[in-house]
Amino acid sequence: MAAKLKIENLTKVFGTDPEEGLRRLRSGESKAAIFEATGNTVGVRDASFEVEQGQIFVVMGLSGSGKSTLVRMLNGLIEPTGGSILIDGQDIARCSTATLRQVRREKVAMVFQHFALFPHMTVADNVAYGLKIKGVAPAERRRRAEAALEQVGLAAYADSMPSELSGGMQQRVGLARGLATDPEILLMDEPFGALDPLIRREVQDELLRLQKALRKTIVFITHDLNEALLLGDRIAIMKDGEIVQIGSAQEIVDHPADDYVRAFVADIDRGRVFTAETVADEPVLLQLGTDTAETAVQNMEDANRAALYVLDGEEIAGVVTYQDAVAAVRDEAATLADAIQPDYPTAEPGAVLNELYGAASSGLPIALTDDNNRLIGVVEPQAVLAQLSGEAGAPNGVPDKD
């Protein structure tokens, strides 16, 4: 799939002679050496990444890391010193002012941290402001503003004033304003940074809910690693103007690129980052009416599993443990059906590991099922504990034979 947004070697040097700073960068000088020699400050250095259609790409970094400079270049608010910004293959870093204006009006919207609502306008008029700038007729502006407010759960507040809304509601108005113009790319510069933790989590969940339905391409800026891990399909971590690692939340937590990233993720709750599907195994299946207790024992020994799921056609009939299968083998009158436990733990593939503690405590493998309740994977209890402790490859614990 072609990237919706492609950034190549994007660089920004602030100062009286940015071209000299860029030349020194290209020759390999450090940010500190360039500042000492020229007084120019390197804001962003050779940033390169791609964002696919429908992805949330999070850029995370501390103050001064260059993340806000980066997103402002993507919107044309800051002119790059070098590199390219390709939107659908068009380089807006080197386009005319008229083309940039058209891209910003038709393809890109930005949501800022401090709401930027006009206090003298109603909520609906604030949301419709971008449409007014585009020359949309008043009736259509109102219709689209109300539709955007409906998406963020604020339709009833269309005629309220911003001062009548809480901080979280005001931020949702800002989000609705970004959505009202139906942009293809949404740039969000620390949009939830001014909210208290409880409201912030509510608005994060709201964004994830909207994204499931709208599938916008989003570049999201934050200094909060937990927020980055929660929201990002892919995450870029910046330091001193450079991107030091790009990956999924799981990749960054499991395989930090350097000591800087390792220090960031050291205290992260892995149970909120990793999901059931990240620790799942392919199911080794038994078929009711075809397999026997003997084949169940043999399959468990071959696969080093302590329990296997038994299907009746495509439906899950239950789970059989090694001990119960061995007991059925010894009892000549017993069948595989007699050894099955019909009650078993289940989970969705996207469930985070913190949600699996109760299911894992049963000691049985957790069945991962799709929307049609078909078995698509199993999670061994030991795999949950191993991932939470940061230790991979724990054995599944097939008991020794008597």
Image (cartoon, helix red, strand yellow):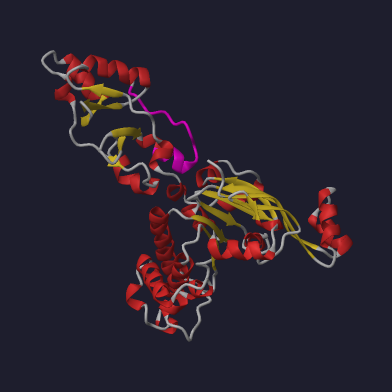
Secondary structure mostly seen in magenta is loop
Horizontally, is 134 left or right of 384 in the view?
A: right
Q: Nearer the viewer, residue 170 or 145?
A: 145
Residue drawn at 42 percent across, 69 percent down: 199
Q: State the image quarter where residue 142 is shown.
A: bottom left
Asked if residue 257 lies in the magenta stretch, the reply is no
Q: Whole-percent x and y of residue 149?
A: 38, 70
Total number of numbered discs in the rendering: 0
Q: Nearer the viewer, residue 114 or 330?
A: 114
Asked if residue 389 lies in the magenta stretch, the reply is yes
**Above/below status of 20 relative to 6:** below
Q: Nearer the viewer, residue 201 or 267?
A: 201
Q: Whole-percent x and y of residue 100?
A: 64, 62
Residue range corresponding to the magenta coloring: 384-399
Q: Does residue 37 show up?
A: yes
Residue drawn at 31 percent across, 18 percent down: 299
Q: Whole-percent x and y of residue 286?
A: 25, 22
Q: Whole-percent x and y of residue 74?
A: 63, 59
Horizontally, is 254 left or right of 69 in the view?
A: left
Name the quarter where the C terminus is drawn: top left
Q: State the image quarter where residue 39 is shown.
A: bottom right
Horizontally, is 380 left or right of 262 in the view?
A: left
Q: State the image quarter where residue 289 is shown.
A: top left
Q: Does residue 402 show up?
A: no
